[in-house]
Amino acid sequence: MSVVLKVAATKDHVLKVPDGDDQIAMLHSALEDSIYISWEVNNTYQAYFTAWDDESVAYQMLTVQNMVEIDGQWFVIKQCEPDYSGGIGTTAVTLQHISGEISRMHIYGSDPVDWGQYSHTGNSNVSLDVPNNTDTVAQSVSPSDILNAFFGGDNGKNWNITYQVIGSFNNAMVENPYAAGSGKDAISRILEAWPSAVFWPDNLNLRIYSHDEFYKDYGHRYDYLRDTSEVQLQYDTTDMTNAARLVGATQEIQTTSDTGLPNGSLTASGGAQAVIADAKKYLGVPYKYGYGRPVGVANPYDGMDCSSFVSRVYYDFGINIPAYTVAMESYGHEISRDQVQTGDMGFYGSKGASHHICMALDNNTMIYEPQPGEVCKTEPISYYPPTWWERNYDMAKIVAGGSSSDDGTASTTDSKEQYYFAPFYFVDETSRQRWGLFVGDDITSDTITDKEQMKAYAESQFKANPDFTLQLTVDPGKEIVEGDMVRLEIRPADYVTKVGLVGYQKYPYSHTQSSTVTLNSNAANILDFQRSQQTNLSRLQEQTKSLIISSNNRDDSNNAWNETEVKAFDSSKRS
């Protein structure tokens, strides 16, 4: 059977909800069982259908960028696939919700643009000077601030867009919230800064909901075998993270350091020997990852890792270099293997991604902190040769017997970059105890200066629980509402819970096609299901135990169960 759909073409494909000023025709040949809408919260909003060629104007209008109204919402045609078979022409149509067209609009912020003959709402102060947009600036903003910047005033009017913020949101620190970008970029910034927010558009009315405002209980329920013929449950730990090294903001500090060396007294050999002696005083110090920082503050004898050890030796001579291998790469220039001398740095790994470092005592010997479970030691360079070598100019001067004035001891004044708090390893213990350890990449922030704030930020970035998918096949005609907090009951699993509807593929006009819905995954749902499984297993174990006791009390020993029969019974109940 066919459904009547409204097809529209706006002049010059202007982004707007079609009205009486546009070309509109009624399509009578869309097959009702082929029409479905696919939606996933904050991700997908598309539609699909197939129509047959009834030689109507509406059918001829099924071309890209024209629009079709389906279930009260306008969708833009993105793909058309005409097909001719057996004398009948059909067209399969793929559509995107009209709100997706905000990717076509672009705001340039303060970037200069020569607009020429085109009307605009952006900056018109054109200059040949290249703006400095490299600095990352975090600002405290709300979702409304970002929406106003992109869609407020003439911007929204020119693109026929309105917007709403529904619910309460605290301000968040957002890096460059008003930077140039598309309308889609603006929505993405909001969803990244407020992960629990929901973007749900009503045609071109763009709506940002808080979690509690979007997910509502409308009194609907899905009971397995009554409302739904199939329930699929799936765990997926692929993207889990519950631990990482946290690296916060840095600051520049002016320092004056005593080199510990008498002025004017070093010869070439004396300088090298002083560096060797200083490095060897750390022999036996245990390798401890992340220890020894901040260099000059932390006690090196409590433990150091490979980079903090080399940085510490340099620090002892008034040379301030970072204590991270990649950052240390820029504090020297590359040299060949045959040029290596005291104080040179040996890097392991590729440039820009080095992962280990040692220091040369001479052309044949190196000193380094090897790995966890070992201590600072010397080895022949040939035993574990670095990928490449670098020489630091200031260290080379000391090794060569560099000197300063004759006022006792030499000192240097320099500025160094220092963390507000030492980078540290952080674990979501609740998640670790429940699922095990999942270590992710470093979590960094250029703005956070407080350790506790950094922990809170990390927790918002972790994915502490597995993806837990509940997908239901629901009977035709069952009402499906976005954000619906439905009651789900799976009686065979003794499982009852409340979950939010976060996705669907529904057939709004079909009387025969079953829709599928996806329900929200969260820690409570996972634990509820685990508890139901454990309860079911405990009940089966008690039944098995009772049967064993009963069989042992029988007078007829030939009727007693043997061990194999008990295991077979238990297995049959679990399956």
Image: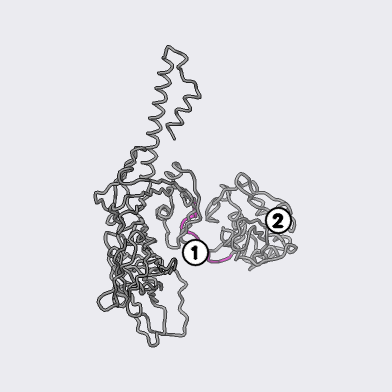
Classed neighbour count for the residue bearing mark 1: other residues with Cα under 10 Å, few (<14), some (14–19), many (≥20): few
The vertical placement of 555 against 460, above or below, is above
Give amino acid for label 1: Ile
Based on the picture, tell me whether residue 494 belongs to the magenta stretch. Answer: no
Give the class, few, some or many, for how many residues have Cα within 10 Å of label 2's Cα (few <14, many ≥20).
some
What is the span of residues highlighted in magenta in the rendered image? 412-424
**In this rendering, which labeled residue sits more in front, label 2 or label 1?**
2
Percent position (x, y) of residue 514?
Answer: 34, 52
Magenta-colored segment: predominant secondary structure: strand
- Count of numbered marks: 2
Mark number, residue 253: 1
Q: Name the amino acid type tagged 2.
A: Pro
State the SS at label 2. loop
84 w.r.t. 443: above or below: below
Q: Is residue 476 visible?
A: yes
Q: Secondary structure at mark 1?
A: strand
In the image, 338 versus 216, the foreground residue is: 216
Rendered image quadrant of residue 205: bottom left
User: From the image, which quarter does the C terminus lie in?
Assistant: top left
> What residue is disc 2 on?
385
Q: Nearer the viewer, residue 35 or 395?
A: 35
> Is 188 left, or right, of 482 in this rendering?
right
The answer to whether residue 274 is visible is no
